[in-house]
Image: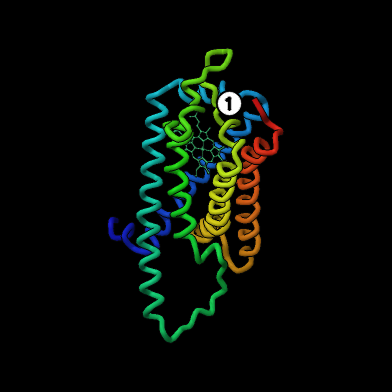
């Protein structure tokens, strides 16, 4: 059994399964961010923290998913590189895309973004003067809305987030399509459909995420 998970197929299945968990997370997170448009983001954030034990169990689960995904991603990338080195007689004739070729790099950018983002909005040590926990709203909730608005009113900060979301867009464009392929849900006939599904889903997530910093930057959301 263990040898199966150590095989390339086993690793790809685990990559796809852990990737799917993270897709669910980014989907849920973007929907959570949308509460900003209804004036509920502080209440929403308060509810997220209402059950600390559950929150920490979820965080540890997601950390395990991320750790496994990164570890296997690096391994598979090394294996691919070694295989390419050997395949001297077969020059790459397969059609590939910029997103597919750079999964390891877009993944690394997302990883670096994630560390920055957690320090920024969760630990709140970047721009501590805007920290939600230090500024309560009228209802006594940490003012996440104010923290986001004051942060993204700065062009460099908004630009940093938009650039990171471009890496997410590229990573998911190939990642989602690759997920269908790994689970055998894609063949020669359905490939164009699964490719389009990956691109459309990634683009919708991209637009959803960048809408918050952009709306704040152009003054459509303000304190
Ligand atoms: C413009 C885009 C984004 C905005 C505005 C945003 C906003 C936020 C905010 C306000 C929080 C803190 C919520 C709270 O605890 O009160 C947060 C937490 C978090 N965000 Fe984001 N986020 C963005 C993109 C992303 C992306 C793309 C990812 C993943 C790749 C991500 C992963 C996380 C994680 C893991 C947390 C910590 C959740 C926890 O407390 O356990 N975020 N985000």
Residue at the left extreme, as displayed: 2
Question: Which quarter of the picture shows residue 221?
Answer: top right
Question: Which quarter of the picture shows residue 195?
Answer: bottom right
Residue drawn at x 54%, y 76% is 94
Q: Position of residue 119 (x, y in %)?
A: 43, 36
Q: Position of residue 170 (x, y in %)?
A: 56, 57
Q: Secondary structure at mark 1?
A: helix
Q: Please state which of residues 172 and 112 is positioned toward the viewer in this rendering.
A: 112
Residue drawn at x 45%, y 35% is 126
Q: Relative to residue 87, is residue 205 depicted above or below? A: above
Q: Which residue is mark 1?
A: 146
Question: Which quarter of the picture shows residue 11?
Answer: bottom left
Q: Position of residue 82 (x, y in %)?
A: 36, 73
Q: Relative to residue 180, is residue 118 depicted above or below? A: above
Q: Relative to residue 140, is residue 28 depicted above or below? A: below
Instruction: From the viewer's perspective, tell me whether residue 147 is left or right of residue 193.
Output: left
Question: Quadrant where the C terminus lies?
Answer: top right
Q: Relative to residue 138, is residue 79 depicted above or below? A: below
Q: Please state which of residues 113 and 157 is positioned toward the viewer in this rendering.
A: 157
Residue at the top extreme, as displayed: 139
Question: Quadrant where the N terminus lies?
Answer: bottom left
């Amino acid at each position: 059994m263990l040898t199966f998970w150590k095989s390339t197929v086993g690793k790809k299945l685990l990559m796809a399964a852990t990737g799917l968990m993270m897709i669910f997370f980014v989907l849920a997170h973007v929907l959570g961010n949308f509460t900003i448009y209804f004036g509920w983001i502080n209440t929403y954030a308060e509810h997220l923290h209402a059950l600390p034990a559950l929150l920490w169990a979820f965080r540890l689960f997601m950390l395990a998913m991320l750790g496994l995904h990164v570890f296997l991603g690096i391994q598979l990338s090394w294996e691919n590189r070694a295989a390419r080195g050997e395949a001297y007689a077969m020059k790459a004739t397969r059609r590939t895309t910029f997103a597919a070729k750079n999964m390891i790099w877009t993944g690394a950018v997302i990883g670096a973004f994630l560390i920055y983002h957690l320090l920024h909005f969760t630990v709140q040590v970047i721009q501590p003067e805007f920290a939600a926990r230090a500024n309560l709203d009228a209802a006594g909730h940490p003012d996440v809305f104010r923290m986001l608005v004051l942060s993204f009113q700065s062009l460099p900060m908004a630009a940093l987030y938009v650039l990171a979301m471009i890496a997410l867009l590229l990573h998911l464009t190939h990642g989602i399509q690759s997920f269908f392929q790994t689970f055998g849900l894609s063949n020669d006939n359905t490939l164009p459909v699964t490719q389009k599904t990956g691109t459309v889903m990634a683009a919708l997530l991209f637009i959803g995420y960048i809408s918050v910093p952009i709306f704040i930057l152009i003054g459509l959301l303000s304190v």
